[in-house]
Image: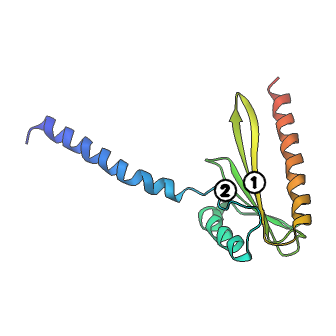
Amino acid sequence: MSKTRLVIRSALLAALLLVALWPDAAARAQEFRPYPSPKVTVDQWQKYLLEVRSRHEASAEIYKDKNVVVFSDPVTRTFYIFTTKDNPAHPAWITRQIVEEGGKVNVRQIGYFAGAQEPFDRMFSEYLELNEQLKHEVEQRNQ
């Protein structure tokens, strides 16, 4: 086999391998919106917590004053905030992702709860306020 054919064959094999692995990599990405409704079961809450923990365990930060544990993914700039048992909204979680839209920083936020809705709504609103503060701070720095 000529050297040129060997190089082409190697390149084709590498491309095929990349194509074969690409869907697998996408399948491993953490789903931002795993359920269609914010009301979930305790089993769904537990399942998602286990999925996030298995992918992002090394990033876990416990905030005892807020009764949450936060996992982060720096590649996607996503934060997963799970309540702990002493949080009034427990069991619940909020996912926040920092994105750039039209040259401005924005925060996508979604949340799910398996407990009472009222404490979850309060928690969700608190994070919406934090998102606005973050966007304001970034705008001030960029001026």
Would residue 76 be found to the left or right of residue 106 on screen? left
- Provide the residue designation for mark 2: 33
Residue 44 appearing in the image? yes
* Residue type beneath disc 1: Ile
Extreme residue toward the left, this view? 1
Task: Kindly check if marks 2 and 1 are in contact, taking CB atoms under 8 A apart as contact.
Answer: yes
Extreme residue toward the top, this view? 143
Distance between the Cα atoms at labels 2 and 1? 7 Å
Residue 7: x percent and y percent? 20, 39
Residue at the (61%, 57%) spot, across then down: 31
Q: Quadrant of the N terminus?
A: top left
Q: Tag 2, which secondary structure? A: loop
User: Viewer-proximal residue, 32 or 137?
Assistant: 32
User: Viewer-proximal residue, 44 or 134?
Assistant: 44
Residue 133: x percent and y percent? 88, 41
Question: Quadrant location of residue 35?
Answer: bottom right
Would residue 31 be found to the left or right of residue 19 on screen? right
User: Viewer-proximal residue, 60 or 90?
Assistant: 90
Residue at the (35%, 53%) spot, across then down: 20
- Provide the residue designation for mark 1: 110
